Image (cartoon, grey):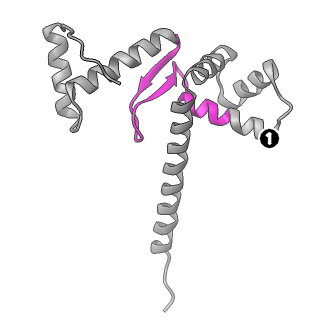
Amino acid sequence: MTAPRSVRFDESVLSRLDRYVREHPGSSSSSVANMFIDESLRAYEHPGIYFRPGPTGRRAAVSGGPDVSEVVAALHAIRAEEPHLEGDSLIEELAAVTGLNAQKVGIAIRYYAAFPEEIDQRIALNRDAAEREEHLWTSQQTLLRRQSS
């Protein structure tokens, strides 16, 4: 549910907000301000998390590392392969797989604990996009093969 709230912005902020809205058709000043304020508050509450754009939309990422969804997807894969791992052993394995240190793994897992639906949805979007791309690549390869007469 949304609630109206009067907020005053500096002219330079409004100018950049207007430019962003013009560059992103379908957005509005209100929706963009809400998105960026929400992201800023999440980053404040979860130090080490920031948000970046991508082909499937803006997403949470570990500073200097991968998207949170990629870390969590790796977590799910490790759990499927080695269900006995837990605690520090699981974090160590996840760090080895992702190339992150244990602290950054912890940052990603903490964010996932706070926003599991968002991250699970992002994992599903990434999986769907990968499947589409693989299908297109396979179709392209078929078209490029020499056809026998």
Position of 27 with respect to 75 (left or right) is: left
Which sits in the foreground, 60 or 99? 60
Where is residue 30 drawn, in percent x and y?
23, 23
State the residue position of label 1.
81
> Is 64 contained in the magenta span?
yes
Q: Which residue occupies 46% across, 15% down?
A: 42
Q: Residues within 10 Å of mark 1 (few under 14, many from 20)?
A: few
The region drawn magenta spans: 46-74
Residue at the far right in the pictured view? 84
Which image quadrant is residue 82 in? top right
- Count how many numbered circles sit on residues in the image: 1
Where is residue 16 drawn, in percent x and y?
19, 19
Which sits in the foreground, 2 or 103? 2
Q: Classify the position of the N terminus by image quarter.
A: top left
Residue at the far bottom in the pictured view? 149
Tag 1: residue type?
Answer: Glu
Position of 17 with respect to 145 (left or right) is: left
Q: Which residue occupies 27% across, 20% down?
A: 33
Where is residue 112 drawn, in percent x and y?
59, 24
Image height of 38 relative to 134, above or below? above
Where is residue 69 drawn, in percent x and y?
56, 32
What secondary structure is marked by label 1? helix
Position of 69 with respect to 95 (left or right) is: left
Q: Which residue occupies 29% across, 18% down?
A: 3
> Is 6 contained in the magenta span?
no
Which image quadrant is residue 5 in? top left
Image height of 57 relative to 115, above or below? below
